[in-house]
Each structure stands twice: as structure tokens, then as C-alpha cells.
Image (tube, grey):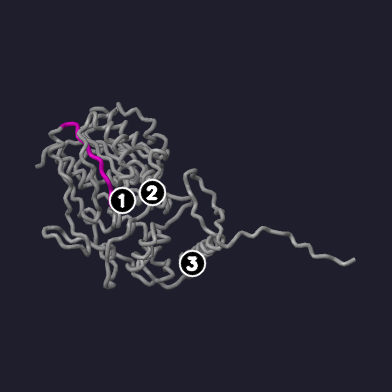
Amino acid sequence: MDSETVVSEVPVEPADQAVPSRIRSTSPLHEPRALTAAERERFRESARRAREAKSAAMRGEGTAPLHSINVPSLNPYDLMPQLKGRGLRSLSLFSGGGGLDIGFERAGFEHVASYEIMEDAAATLVKARPDWQVFGGDDGDVRKVDWRQWRKKVDVLHGGPPCQPFSHAGRQRGALDPRDMWPEFVRAALEIMPAAFVGENVAALADSKFSEYVAEQIVAPLSEKYTVMPVTVLHAADFGIPQVRRRVFFIGFRTKVAARRFKVPAPTHNRPGAVVVEGLLSGMGVRSALGLPDIGFDDLSPTIRSTLNGPRNTTSILNSVSAKKKFELLKIWPNGVALTREAAQKFVAQNGHFRLSVPDVALIQGFPEDWPFVGATYMVLGQIGNAVPPPLGYRVAKAVAEALAGKK
């Protein structure tokens, strides 16, 4: 009897049809990228090669280092000189890695307490300031706190509710996003009734798309007890931070006298490559700030993205195609950020560009070198990427203090 070859008919996906990722997302809000099987395979192969190259580098078997270990030229403490206290006390919500907390401390505020739901971020604050009162993990969940316990004990409430509901990376769902914590910030302010509040977020919250949300969910309820200042958008580079980063601030005062005294922080630095304004200090490009050799080109770093978005842990701070092009011009490699400068030197980037380390990314965000972040590399980068640059927070804190106490 003649034999027959039986061929099973296996469905073949069209080459241009998107296929699901093998990586299971732990977030119900994550929307995977629409990639074809070929595109996903290219990513997997790239990741595999990177893992092998990193392992070889750590064993001392990789490519010989191309760059010296850098010594930064920028000291963030110079951007926020310590001010004398004015007897003002601050309480921090959504504290993260401590961007606003550092800024308020350097501006002379007495720290009362910090609330942060991420345990590693709370551990960072405890390690950095053992004398601070820090509520972390479940204790740091602002939804469970009766804020009336802090009434008459706090002069300024500050915090940056999660930005994902309003950021492009978070799909801009606004009030429909369960991570929207602005109602909790408003509740805290109205229950504590401090002399002033400072809330911050991504600049996109100031866009017309969210004007109704801002008016109804933030300004209207707070205006019942506070004089709410016009929405303020500040650029980090105007205050000496070597990065393109805009943040929106919502500021309010219990008394009209303090509100009249408040002045929006004026720029202190010229941006690299911009028209020079007489009387301002010269801002550094990112290469200069990091202490890298002159290559004939320098500029601000693209905006550092948080590494905590998406279905898996990542150590890339790259946030867009345009950012990729800018980093290429700067000859800086923004992917696979290493934990230390020594590890970054050993792990040579395939294109030979300078690989960033966690201390480098922290510096670009305006964190001082001695700030001791806690957690895995991706978690530390997430704390950094989510934070307000401390020198920017410092300028806002200083302006609020001057409005409350009278400029001295």
C-alpha cells in the first residue's frame, strides 16, 4: 500500500499582523505595543545578545572599555544652597524617591512626614534621612489616612500625585484611570488646612484636554478655602538642570496676603544653545554636567522616562524616537543603564557610545550624589524618572516660604 505524507495545516499569521507578547502584563491598564511576529523576534534577539554581552562584561571577557569613569562637573547642591529655617513645616504625599522632599528641606522647611506607597521608595527616604517620619507601603496609602490628625501641625502640604493618568505614556485616561490620586491630594489639603499647598504633575495636565478636569477636580474644591494661583508650568533647564523637563504646579494660600506676596520662580540659568539672557548663570549641557569629553556638541538631555511603566522591568530611560536621535548626537547610550559607573564602563555599548549609570541618571534629574536610592536598578530608575528634580522643587519651596514668611 502506498504511504501518504500527511501534512497538518498550521495557521500562518500574515507577516504584517500583530501578535501578542509572550510577557504577561501584571497591570490591567497596560496596552501592549502592536508588533508583528518578526518585530517581536528581533526584540527578543536583541535582548538576548544584550544579556550575553552584559554577562561577558561582568566576567571581564567583554570588549575593552572605551571610556574613562566620568567625574561629574555639576553638583546639584550648588543649584539649591541650604537656606535657614523660617519655622515652616512641610508634609509630603506621593513622596517617591524624594525630589520635592529634598527641595523643601534645602529651602529651610522642617520635615513633618512623608507618605509613599512603594516600599522601595519609602526605604530610600528612610535610608537618606533616618530621622524623618516616613509612612511606607500600606501605611503610605493616602486613601486610608485621616488627615485631620495633622491639622495645626503642617504649614505646607506638597506632593505629586501619579502622573500616568495624564501622561502620554499612561494613555491620558484622566479621571477614568484608577491611579488618579488628585482627589486624595485635595482631600488631604482640606482636612489638614495648611497655610499653603503645592501639587505638581506632568505638563500635559495643563493642556486644554484636561482643562475641565483641572477646573472641577482641583481648582474648584480647593478654591473654597484657598486662593489658588494661576497654573504654573516650569522648565527644569531654567534652573540649571541639564534635561528637557517641564512640570506643572498648582499652588494655593489660605490668606490673600500670602497669595499677593507669591512670585513665580524666575529662571536662574540660561539654557544651552538658547539666546543668552544677561544676568543669568550659564546652564550646562548633559555631557558637560556628567564630565564627559568635548565632542563638539552638547545639549540638554531628553526627558528621562520612568522605567516603571509597562509589563516588565526595564533599565532604559528612552521615551521617544526623537529622544533616541538626540542621544545619538550626544553619543550617549540610554538603554541598559548600569547600577554603577564602574559597571557602565565595563559594559561597552555596541555603538561605542557612553553608557549611563544610575548615578548619572540621578544627576541629570538633579539628585545629589549622596542620595542613597534603594531597590533593583529598574526600581531606582523609576524613582528617579517619576521625581520632581530637587532643584526645581527647591525654587518653588523657596518662593512659597517667602510668600508665607515675608521675604527676608
Q: Secondary structure at mark 2?
A: loop
List the residue tagged with mark 2: 374
Q: Is residue 251 covered in magenta?
A: yes
Amino acid type assigned to the residue bearing label 1 in the image: Trp
Quick check: 181 left or right of 396?
Answer: right
| Magenta residues (range) | 246-255
Residue drawn at 20 percent across, 39 percent down: 229
Residue 318, position in %: x, y? Answer: 39, 58
Residue drawn at 42 percent across, 56 percent down: 315
Q: Are marks 3 and 1 in contact (CB under 8 Å)?
A: no
Local packing at callout 1 (Cα closer than 10 Å; few below 14, some 14-19, many 20+) is some
Q: Are marks 2 and 3 in contact (CB under 8 Å)?
A: no
List the residue tagged with mark 3: 53
Q: Image quadrant of residue 319?
A: bottom left
Q: Is residue 13 above or below residue 26?
A: below
Amino acid type assigned to the residue bearing label 2 in the image: Val
List the residue tagged with mark 1: 371
Residue 398, position in %: x, y? Answer: 18, 44
